C-alpha cells in the first residue's frame, strides 16, 4: 500500500470515494471544486493506493487556533473504499496524516463526523486510534 499526495488525475476515483462518503457529485463539478482545493495552500489531499487502485482519501485543511497558540489540521474528508475496509488502510492513512502534520509543525488534528447510524463504525475507528469525542457540531446552509 502507498500513501501519496493527490493529483488532478485522481479526480475520477475521488468522485467515487466522495459518493461512498455520502456526498455524490458529478465528475465535472468535482473537477472544478478540486481545482480550487488543489491550488489553495491551506489544503492538502492524500490518496491511499492498494494494488494500483485508489482505495482511500483524506482531505485536510489547515487553520489557526483562537483559543491557544499554534495551528492545527482539520480532516474535512476521510474515506476508505467499502471493499477495502478493515484492512489497515484507514489506520495507515491516519498515520500519514499525523506524520505530515507533525512535520509541518501543527500541534493537533480535528475532525467532525455526522451523528448518523452509518457513521457508527467510523466513530469507533476514530476512538480506537486515539481521537476523543469532544463536541457537537452545528451547521446552517445560507441560501
Image (spheres, helix red, strand yellow):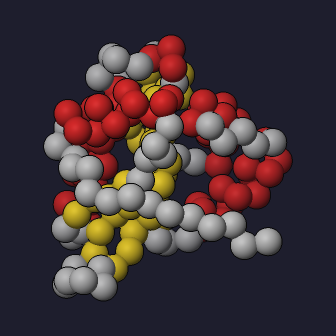
- Asked if residue 91 lies left or right of residue 16, the reply is left
Q: Is residue 25 visible?
A: yes
Name the image quarter holding the C terminus.
bottom right
Using the image, determine if residue 93 lies above or below residue 101: above
Residue placed at 62% from the left, 37% from the top? 22
Residue placed at 34% from the left, 37% from the top? 123
- Asked if residue 131 lies left or right of residue 82, the reply is left
Q: Is residue 5 visible?
A: no
Q: Quadrant of residue 107?
A: bottom left
Question: Where does residue 78 sit, x and y in percent of width and height?
Answer: 45, 42
Residue placed at 50% from the left, 14% from the top? 83
Question: Where does residue 110 sit, x and y in percent of width and height?
Answer: 32, 58
- Asked if residue 45 lies left or right of residue 10, the reply is left
Question: Where does residue 86 sit, x and y in percent of width and height?
Answer: 34, 17
Name the image quarter holding the N terminus.
top left
Question: Where does residue 72 sit, x and y in percent of width and height?
Answer: 29, 69
Q: Nearer the viewer, residue 25 or 114?
A: 114
Using the image, determine if residue 59 lies above or below residue 93: below
Residue placed at 38% from the left, 74% from the top? 63
Q: Nearer the viewer, residue 37 or 118?
A: 118
Using the image, determine if residue 54 lies above or below residue 77: above
- Asked if residue 79 lies left or right of residue 38, the reply is left
Using the image, determine if residue 140 lies above or below residue 54: below
Amino acid at each position: 500500500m502507498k500513501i501519496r499526495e493527490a493529483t488532478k488525475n485522481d479526480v475520477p476515483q475521488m468522485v467515487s470515494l466522495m459518493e461512498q462518503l455520502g456526498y455524490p457529485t458529478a465528475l465535472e463539478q468535482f473537477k472544478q471544486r478540486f481545482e480550487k482545493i488543489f491550488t489553495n495552500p491551506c489544503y492538502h489531499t492524500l490518496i491511499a493506493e492498494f494494488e494500483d487502485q485508489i482505495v482511500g482519501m483524506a482531505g485536510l485543511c489547515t487553520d489557526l487556533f483562537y483559543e491557544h497558540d499554534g495551528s492545527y489540521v482539520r480532516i474535512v474528508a476521510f474515506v476508505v473504499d467499502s471493499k477495502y475496509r478493515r484492512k489497515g488502510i484507514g489506520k495507515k492513512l491516519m498515520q500519514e496524516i499525523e506524520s505530515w502534520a507533525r512535520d509541518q509543525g501543527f500541534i493537533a488534528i480535528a475532525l467532525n463526523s455526522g451523528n448518523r447510524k452509518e457513521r457508527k463504525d467510523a466513530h469507533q475507528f476514530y476512538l480506537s486510534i486515539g481521537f476523543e469525542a469532544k463536541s457537537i457540531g452545528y451547521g446552517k446552509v445560507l441560501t
